[in-house]
């Protein structure tokens, strides 16, 4: 083995170690980001999680009203007895 081959093998080992360290750091960053967003999900008040949940329930309610109107051939207000 000559000097150039030894230097190349050391450079290869160093680059592989650097890639492994970079992967470990990026994994740690992803874990930290997940833990930060996970902690914020269940706070009270106006936040992203509550707005998404309210929007989903509103879509379910709107879809339910459309189904009631299609099946009964009446408007929702007539079906519920608000308008006679």
Image: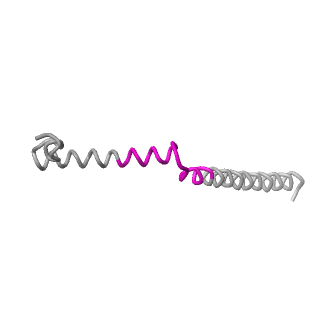
How many discs appear? Answer: 0
Q: Residue furthest right?
A: 3
Residue at the outermost bottom position: 1
Which residue shows up at 11% across the image and 48% down it?
Answer: 72
Left-right relation of 48 to 77: right
Residue 82: percent from left, percent from top: 17, 42
Residue 34 at x, y = what percent?
A: 60, 53
Q: Quadrant of the C terminus?
A: top left
Q: Nearer the viewer, residue 57 or 34?
A: 57
**Which residue corresponds to the image point at 40% horizontal and 46% vertical from the top-left?**
54
Question: Toward which corner of the image does residue 13 lie, by quadrant?
Answer: bottom right
Q: Position of residue 12 (x, y in %)?
A: 78, 53
Q: Is residue 58 magenta?
A: no
Residue 46 lies within the magenta run: yes
Q: Is residue 14 left or right of residue 55?
A: right
Identified at 58% across, 50% down, the residue is 40
> What secondary structure is the magenta-colored segment mainly?
helix
Toward the viewer: 63 or 14?
Answer: 63
Q: Establish if 38 lies above or below 66.
A: below
10, 80: nearer the viewer: 80
- Magenta stretch? 36-57
For the N terminus, the image quarter is bottom right
The structure's colour scheme is one colour
Q: Nearer the viewer, residue 18 or 43?
A: 43
Query: Would you say 10 lies left or right of 72 here?
Result: right
Residue located at (81% from left, 56% from top): 9
Q: Position of residue 4 (x, y in %)?
A: 86, 51
């Amino acid at each position: 083995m000559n000097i150039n081959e030894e230097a190349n093998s050391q450079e290869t080992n160093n680059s592989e170690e650097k890639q492994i360290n970079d992967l470990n750091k990026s994994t740690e960053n992803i874990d930290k980001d997940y833990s930060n967003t996970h902690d914020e999900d269940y706070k009270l008040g106006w936040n992203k999680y509550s707005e998404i949940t309210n929007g989903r329930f509103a879509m379910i309610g709107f879809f339910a009203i459309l189904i009631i109107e299609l099946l009964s051939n009446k408007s929702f207000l007539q079906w519920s007895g608000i308008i006679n």
